[in-house]
Image (tube, rainbow, N blue to C red):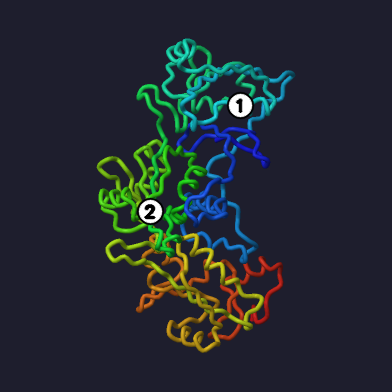
């Protein structure tokens, strides 16, 4: 991908997830409105998705900011390389012929290549050639070009090792010049005569199911609100979108699609088979979608709340009950709201939340009913079983009771967090050494005895 600095300026290149080279001038700001539940926190959601597609597991409770000095920065999944010419007496001289396809407006920005090289000290001679011109046709034949746009590069490439490495991985050397061959979609496929990687994307929703606006798509151990998914995929996977259309459930087209694909719940997302141009993305959606006879991917594994079309009712309405430590453990005890963040990132959104001190009447009832010995904690209503991402990790953090309610119990995942032990009526931690380190040596009262 093209690497931008803090001001959105192009500074370098990198390889895409599938090993192909890609260049883009887009910054990380997400524009536009899709339905009235569009969030200003798209960037946060994108950041969560990037970390979680790689990391997996119940990530948030292990890396919450209020515990252990804050979350650790994730290790990048691919290196971010700024091209830095090897010091020499004169600037490296690079010649670039950019073979362009004007009709491929969403394809990668081929002009980023000379721009970045110039910004990093190279002396670049550049030429732009349209592929339908006589010169373009001659270049296509001579260098066996099958994907556009592309670049034919020559000159003192060895003086820029990082760039040379990219060309070796994503290109082919012909007649002493490098030709980019492995290009990330979207691109114009000359053999097929069409643009590859521009996805047709359709969303079907019910305007009267207000709870359904919290529905999200489970992406491994993360979740993204369904209305943000298209923009998120554009940012994370640099996908091209040919169409992005929304259909309200009561429209003629929506009813036709519901019948055609035998949809059972809304919202629903339908994507064209152009998704196959993105192997990493296709692998993810293969687990949460069905592939229809026309090649379309119908996303069926959706986190609730969603509208059950057979009953006409919303399913998956979850309640949270927080049992607080109250004055018995302030300010030492961990911030119980971290559970909210963790659950939201798994796609579990509460439609109602209740807060009780452990020594209040409701608090005493809950602690007795579920044999709770450590607080703060959280209880989740049985509907949480409809959330696939949560069900894939719940054994790491707690258990379900006979009545179907889930209770958070595994304080080990909080890594040195303070809690109040109801059996001893003292502040406690499962790892005094880690907690001592995190607090700079200032242990809360009643610890270490």
Tell me the residue at 57%/25% (across/down).
164
Which of label 1 and label 2 is nearer to you?
2
Tell me the residue at 66%/76% (across/down).
331
**Residue 325 against residue 207 in the figure, above or below:** below
**Residue 38 against residue 374 in the figure, above or below:** above
Q: Is residue 259 left or right of residue 63?
A: left
Question: Residue 87 location, x and y as percent?
Answer: 71, 25
Label drawn at residue 49:
none
Question: Residue 286 location, x and y as percent?
Answer: 34, 47
Circle 2 crowding by C-alpha within 10 Å: few under 14, some 14–19, many from 20: some
Residue in front for this viewpoint, 371 or 119? 119
Label drawn at residue 161:
1
Tell me the residue at 49%/57% (across/down).
37
Question: Residue 28 location, x and y as percent?
Answer: 58, 44
Q: Is residue 255 left or right of residue 351?
A: left
Q: Earlier in the sequence, mark 1 or mark 2?
A: 1
**Residue 127 against residue 187 in the figure, above or below:** above
- Quadrant holding the C terminus: bottom right
Label drawn at residue 248:
2
């Amino acid at each position: 991908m093209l690497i931008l600095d803090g001001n959105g300026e192009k500074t370098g290149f990198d390889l895409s997830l599938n090993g192909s080279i890609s260049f883009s001038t887009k910054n990380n700001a997400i524009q536009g409105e899709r339905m009235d539940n569009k969030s200003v926190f798209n960037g946060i959601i994108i950041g969560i998705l990037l970390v979680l597609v790689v990391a997996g597991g119940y990530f948030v409770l292990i890396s919450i900011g209020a515990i252990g000095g804050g979350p650790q920065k994730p290790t990048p999944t691919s290196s971010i390389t700024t091209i830095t010419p090897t010091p020499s007496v004169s600037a490296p001289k690079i010649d670039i012929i950019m073979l362009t396809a004007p009709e491929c407006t969403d394809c990668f920005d081929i002009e980023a290549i000379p721009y970045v090289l110039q910004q990093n000290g190279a002396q670049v001679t550049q030429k732009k050639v349209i592929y339908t011109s006589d010169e373009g046709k001659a270049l296509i034949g001579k260098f066996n070009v099958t994907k556009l746009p592309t670049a034919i590069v020559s000159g003192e490439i060895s003086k820029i090792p990082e760039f040379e490495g990219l060309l070796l991985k994503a290109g082919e050397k012909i007649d002493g010049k490098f030709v980019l061959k492995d290009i990330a979609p979207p691109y114009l496929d000359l053999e097929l005569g069409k643009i590859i990687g521009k996805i047709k994307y359709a969303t079907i929703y019910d305007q009267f199911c207000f709870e359904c606006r919290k529905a999200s798509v489970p992406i491994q151990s993360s979740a993204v609100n369904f209305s943000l998914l298209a923009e998120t995929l554009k940012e994370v996977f640099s996908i091209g979108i040919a169409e992005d259309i929304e259909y309200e459930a009561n429209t003629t087209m929506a009813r036709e699609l519901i019948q055609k694909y035998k949809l059972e719940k809304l919202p629903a997302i339908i994507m064209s088979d152009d998704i196959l141009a993105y192997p990493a993305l296709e692998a993810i959606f293969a687990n949460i979608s069905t592939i229809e006879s026309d090649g379309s991917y119908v996303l069926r594994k959706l986190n609730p709340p969603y509208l059950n079309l057979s009953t006409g009712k919303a399913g998956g309405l979850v309640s949270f009950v927080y049992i607080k430590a109250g004055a018995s453990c302030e300010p030492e005890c961990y911030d119980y709201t971290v559970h909210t963040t963790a659950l939201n990132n798994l796609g579990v959104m509460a439609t109602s939340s209740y807060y009780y001190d452990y020594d209040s009447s409701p608090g005493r009832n809950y602690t007795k009913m579920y044999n709770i010995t450590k607080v703060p904690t959280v209880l989740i209503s049985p509907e949480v079983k409809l959330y696939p991402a949560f069900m894939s990790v719940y054994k790491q953090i707690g258990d379900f009771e006979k009545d179907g309610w889930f209770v958070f119990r595994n304080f080990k995942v909080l890594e040195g967090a303070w809690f109040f032990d109801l059996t001893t009526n003292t502040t406690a931690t499962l790892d005094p050494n880690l907690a001592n380190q995190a607090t700079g040596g200032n242990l809360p009262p009643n610890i270490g005895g």
